[in-house]
Amino acid sequence: MSHHRRSIHEAGGWGITVVSIQQMYAGHAAQVMALAAQCTAGAYFGKYVIVVDDDIDPTNIHQVLWAMATRSRPAQSIDILRETWSTYLDPSLNPPEIRPWGSKCLINACMDYRFYKTFSRRTKLAKETYDKVVGRWQELGFSGTPPVITVFEDEKFPSSID
């Protein structure tokens, strides 16, 4: 299965692990979160494990936050592991006597597998529109440089919405 993109990104090795998967079956995301929380980096000082679909770049925090905001449902998508291994160096664990016990937040920011094929389409910008706006950036009154966007709509937008 080497053709499937799997990526793990840690926030400087401290506290956050993001995993990008191609969901293959029901429960896949939950299993990945549980496993990532038990890898050495995730288990020792990992506080947050976030799993996203493979259309999300796990190294791009903006895409990760977008997936969390548009694909997770807090009541159904977040689990907490309590009394887990942590580090004596974690400044959030106070008083120090409670160390090395910590907790972990597992966030499933994937599309719901049950509805994977019918899940709301991701809204992307048309490259043609992006290029027009970038070309007129100053004229439109924007300061600075335009945001760099690399993911665009694959299909043409319809001429009208019926």
Image (cartoon, rainbow, N blue to C red):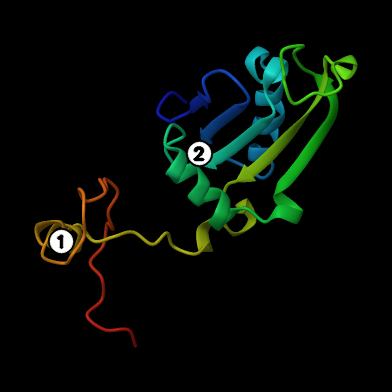
Give, as a three-letter code, the residue at label 2: Gln
Number of marks: 2
**Observer-nearest residue: 9 or 162?**
9
Name which quarter of the figure residue 105 lies in.
Answer: top right
Q: Is residue 54 above or below residue 70?
A: above
Q: Is residue 145 above or below residue 123?
A: above
Q: Residue at x 72, y 21 (%)?
A: 91
Q: Earlier in the sequence, mark 2 or mark 1?
A: 2
What residue would you read off at disc 1?
128
Name which quarter of the figure residue 26 lies in.
Answer: top right
**Observer-nearest residue: 99 or 6?**
99
Q: Position of residue 125 (x, y in %)?
A: 29, 60
Give, as a three-letter code, the residue at label 1: Glu
Q: Residues within 10 Å of mark 2 (few under 14, many from 20)?
A: some
Question: Does residue 11 appear to the left or right of 98 in the view shown?
Answer: left
Element carrying mark 1: helix
The residues tagged by marks 2 and 1 sit, at their Cα atoms, a distance apart of: 29 Å
Q: Residue at x 21, y 49 (%)?
A: 144
Q: Is residue 16 visible?
A: yes
Quarter of the figure with the C terminus: bottom left
The circle on residue 22 is 2
Q: Position of residue 93 (x, y in %)?
A: 80, 23
**Observer-nearest residue: 35 or 101?**
101
Q: Residue at x 65, y 25 (%)?
A: 36
Question: Does residue 125 appear to the left or right of 1 in the view shown?
Answer: left
The circle on residue 104 is none
In the displayed orientation, state which residue is furthest to the bottom.
Answer: 162
Element carrying mark 2: loop
